[in-house]
Structure formats: structure tokens, C-alpha cells
Amino acid sequence: MTPIQDQVKLRFEQLAEQAQKIPFVRTDYSHCADQKSFYAWASSALNLIQGVFDKDSSHYERLHAEVARISNNYIDEDHLNACRGVFLGAKSDVDGEYLFNLQMSFSGEIFGDFVSAAKAALDDGNHTVAAVLACAALEDTLKRYATSKGLDVDGKMMDEVVNTLKSHGLVSGPQKSLLAAMPKIRNHAMHADWAKLTPQDAR
């Protein structure tokens, strides 16, 4: 399990416990959940679900609709249980790791940013800068890919990571040939051997 997944699961667990502890208050006319406690929990729950599943997800839309349906800040037990149920549904998907690899999606965004910056540098004629950015993106992504497959590559150099992936059959065919050249380019880029880097290497 990745550190990001650990943090997300822990936060879901904390909010699930918080949801169960929302107190009820009794007045002369009603018996409802404490407004302050409920809205504090609901705000955090919506924020977490949006961050993990996105605003367009069914979990977010359903919980948001349940909260929006509250009239005059009166949260009866049935309504509270409905909100808890939606949240627990999201938590179940996280616990079951049905997120299609949460960390890989985050990594993909970071990879995209680095590659875009590398392309811009290459277009500006700065192939050495482009090579550093591209190598950093590739090395980070290879390590995350290996970790997602249950391999321990912590502290390993790119050539070691590539060899680990190869030995487990996780790269094959043209990928092997392409990756074989990358550690050498990476070492030139990260050790400031600028004279040994070409625009073709960066590209």
C-alpha cells in the first residue's frame, strides 16, 4: 500500500468514527442531530470525497444532495443515517482499493506537468533543462509503477529499477530497448554532464 493510500484510508476511518459520534439534541419540539457537529463533519466528508473521487462521482453528488436537502437545519436521525450511509459507501470503495490505483492517477498529473515543462524547454532550445525534467519524471514514474506492483525499489537508482521491472516481466519488447538507454541519459542529466546530452536525448 502506498503512503497516499494510507493517508486517505486513515482519514476515511477518522471521519467514519466522527460520524458515529455526532450527538443528538432534544428540544421541546424536536430531536435532531447537533448542527455544529453535523456540518463540521459533512464539510470534511465532502472535501475528502471530492479530493479522492472528484466532484462528478456518484459518492460526492449523492452526499452533496443529501446535505443540500436539509431544511431549516433540521437533521433527523433518518437523514443523518442517509448521509452516513453514502459516506460509508465511499469508504468501502477506498478500503477495497477500488480506486483504480489512486497514487498512479496523482502521479500521472505530476508526470504531465513535468513533461509539459520539458517540451516547453526543448522548444525554447534548452535541451539540457528538458532532459533533467524528463528524466526526473520518468524516474519517479518508474519507481511508482514498481511500487504499485509490490516491488521494493526505495533508494534504488534508475538502472536498478529498470532491471527490477525487467526481471519481473513488467516491461517487454520495445519497452526494454527504450528503457535500456534511459539510465545513461539520466546520469548525464543529473550529474551535469551537459556536453554529453543532445536534443535527441531529451526528445
Image (cartoon, helix red, strand yellow):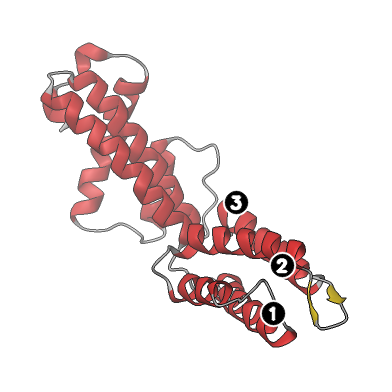
SS at badge 1: helix
SS at badge 2: helix
Q: How many numbered marks appear?
A: 3
Q: Which mark is residue 3?
A: 3
Which residue is at the front of the view, 26 or 200?
26
SS at badge 3: helix
From the image, tell me which residue sits under label 2.
Answer: 38
Q: Are marks 1 and 3 in contact (CB under 8 Å)?
A: no
Question: Residue drawn at (34%, 38%), measured in percent from left and top?
Answer: 137
Q: Quadrant of the C terminus?
A: top left
Amino acid on which disc 3 is placed: Pro
Give left or right: position of 49 versus 159.
right
Give left or right: position of 112 versus 80.
left
Question: Callout 3: 10 Å neighbours few (<14), some, many (20+)?
Answer: few
From the image, tell me which residue sits under label 1.
Answer: 80
**Relative to residue 101, is residue 7 depicted above or below?**
above
